[in-house]
Amino acid sequence: MTVQPDPSHAAPADAQQGAHAASARTATARPAAPRVAFPVGAAALAPYSIAARPRREVDERAVPAMVLAAWAAVFVNVLAFAGNATVFPIPRIVGQLITQGALGLALGLALLANRRRVIRPHLFLVLLTMLALVAVMVSFHNQYLLSSVFRACRLLGFATVLWVLSPWFGRRDMLLLRCHLICLRAVLGTVVVGALLSPGLAFSFDGRLAGVLWPIPATQVAHYAAVLLCVTVILWLCRVVSGRLTIATVVLVTPILLATHTRTALLAGVVGMAVAGASLFLGHARVRRTSALGAILAVLAATVFASQITDWLLRGQSAQDAGKFTGRTKVWSQVFAVHRTPIHEMFGNGMSNLSFNGLPIDSNWVATYLDEGWFGIAVEAAILVALLLLAITHVRGPRRAIGLFLLVYCAIASVTETGLGNPSPYILDLAVAAALLAPEAHGVER
């Protein structure tokens, strides 16, 4: 290291010449190292800080093709094959082979994506696997042995695929959420195309929009539309996606949701959005402005269009029928009226087709009591509580807000829909919520 002389003292001429000669020898023997400037303070953290980077970068990164393919296969596995007519007739056996066979494809694709065979422990996956294992054991005592065991093994296989995809839990770029949104857009795209090709067929069930390219019931169409719409709005509130994408989603998806005439999806979406917005209220000025504007518009709409809103909610039913959940309470009463042994009350009768005496149960908690008993209800409640605690302790931001929305949405929908105890879009939504609320991954498959 060369020490610069003090300019206040003049050095002798011979000393200066000796210093110059020494500097020349040093330069000849060792080239000077390039000077590198290291930023300090906030500038040093900018490349690694989420706040310093543009928010929209998260949404513009390329999605790994193998992970997307595996998630798409899982999504196909939970698609319902309803009995409504389609534009191009699909035999029921073919539809079931496609949906149920997609689980094996999803497992293979997930293994190809996770070449290092890394798994991340997560309480959600542990509880889901425990539920599946007990369901397999109980199903061996069901009177419909083969079908019951098959459904239980399918749930176990579904949990296995999620275990293989667990390395992508806890990512800052929300990879699994982005895969989920891509699948939602694709499915709703088929619904729109089917409605354009055959509008009479698409609205043939009580005037409610359903899928007719692939037979998707109106309730599931509403579920997909509500999740896509609300999640996109939350991402916009957090400045993760652009305004153009948000406007396009609102303009295209809102009519789909309204055309399904599904009260459960609308109520769950509104309450979920309120909870997600409350979690962001203090930290985002855009959320506060949007909430105020939304409250004003809601009051105006309720005042001006009160009769139209009431007609839409009742769907031609009486207020008494709507209060009884469209006759669902009769089936629920029949399920609980059946005498059971203590072992059946605790662990249920094994996996079924979610019906009782030929009628759909249409309640997750009643169906779980029938199939997996009080044990299944306790495990599913534990899943919701565990995810809620993760959300409460998670840092404020889009991951926490979307996780809360999905959790609240599934909890409300579980009253009049089935799906938390078997492979379904609802348990897939909870898997996305678990991935968002998981701690950030370090040293695993990225």
Image (cartoon, rainbow, N blue to C red):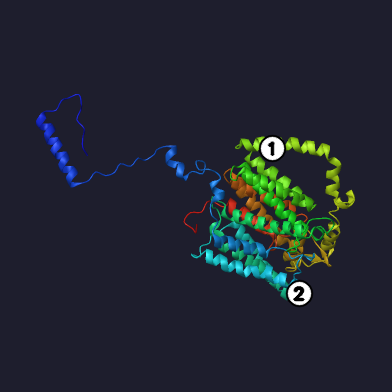
Q: Looking at the image, is 43 positioned above or below residue 211? A: above
Query: In the figure, is residue 105 to the left or right of 446?
Result: right
Quarter placement of the N terminus:
top left
From the top left corner, tell me how far across and down residue 439 is, in percent. Answer: 54, 51
Q: Calculate the distance from the C-alpha at mark 2 to the C-alpha at mark 1.
A: 52 Å
From the top left corner, tell me how far across and down residue 169 is, in percent. Answer: 56, 55
Towards the viewer: 96 or 425: 96
Q: Earlier in the sequence, mark 2 or mark 1?
A: 2
Reading the image, the residue beneath label 1 is 291
Q: Secondary structure at mark 2?
A: loop
What residue is drawn where x is 78% and y is 68%? 341
Q: Secondary structure at mark 1?
A: helix
Reading the image, the residue beneath label 2 is 144
Question: Label 1 sits on what residue type?
Answer: Ser
Question: Label 2 sits on what residue type?
Answer: Tyr
Tag 1: Cα neighbours inside 10 Å, few (<14), some, or many (≥20)? some
